[in-house]
Amino acid sequence: MSQTELMLRPAYENECGFLTELCLRSKAVHGYDADFMAACVDELAVTPKKLAQGGHVVADQAGKAIGFAQVLEDDDGWWLDALFVSPELIGHGVGKVLLEAVTDLARQGGAQGVLIDSDPGAEEFYLSRGAVRVGLSPSGSIPGRFLPQMRLAL
């Protein structure tokens, strides 16, 4: 996919349901069963409250959202809260563009790095973008499950 076909824009509150479904479809490409995915719904939901926190971007192609990413800041620093791409477009550069866009937002906010709690299936993508594994982080959805925690220097 050429980047000229892709427009980056803020998310609209009226598309929260669609963006939530996009995130869930993207997560499901890693082979999770229905019970696992049901446990992830609350954590992956894109809500008006989440959008109000800022730091988000939508990849739009021909007027349709095909990706969503968000970085947030708290007392511990900046972290990647979401990065999801429509399954049929994974591997076509959309994730790279989204990651660059949200890390630019973090950099503009003064971040020197971004923490990423990566799905194990997405770890290779973040490594390819220069992130390094720094530990493990407990899953927000599945008790007893741990995710690769990574740091991307900016």
Image (cartoon, rainbow, N blue to C red):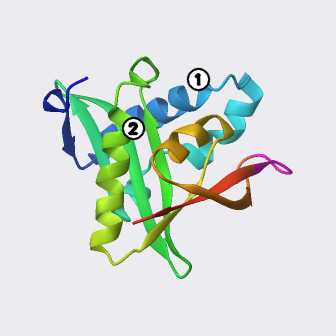
Q: Are marks 2 and 1 in contact (CB under 8 Å)?
A: no
Q: Position of residue 23 (x, y in %)?
A: 49, 35
**Number of other residues with Cα within 10 Å of mark 2, as a class: few under 14, some 14 to 19, many 20 or more:** many
- Element under disc 2: helix
- Which amino acid type corresponds to the residue marked 2 in the rendered image? Gly
**Residue at the disc numbered 1:** 29
Q: Position of residue 45 (x, y in %)?
A: 52, 44
User: Residue 89: x, y in percent?
Assistant: 38, 22
Give the residues in magenta.
Answer: 142-146
Q: Is residue 119 magenta?
A: no
Location of residue 49 with respect to 146 vertically, above or below: below
Q: Position of residue 100 (x, y in %)?
A: 32, 51
Magenta region, mostly helix, strand or loop?
A: loop
Q: Measure the C-alpha gap from mark 2 to mark 1.
A: 14 Å
Of 45 and 28, which appears nearest the observer?
Answer: 28
- For label 2, the residue is 95
Q: Earlier in the sequence, mark 2 or mark 1?
A: 1
Q: Which mark is residue 128?
A: none
Q: Residue at x 46, y 22 (%)?
A: 87
- Amino acid type shown at disc 1: Val
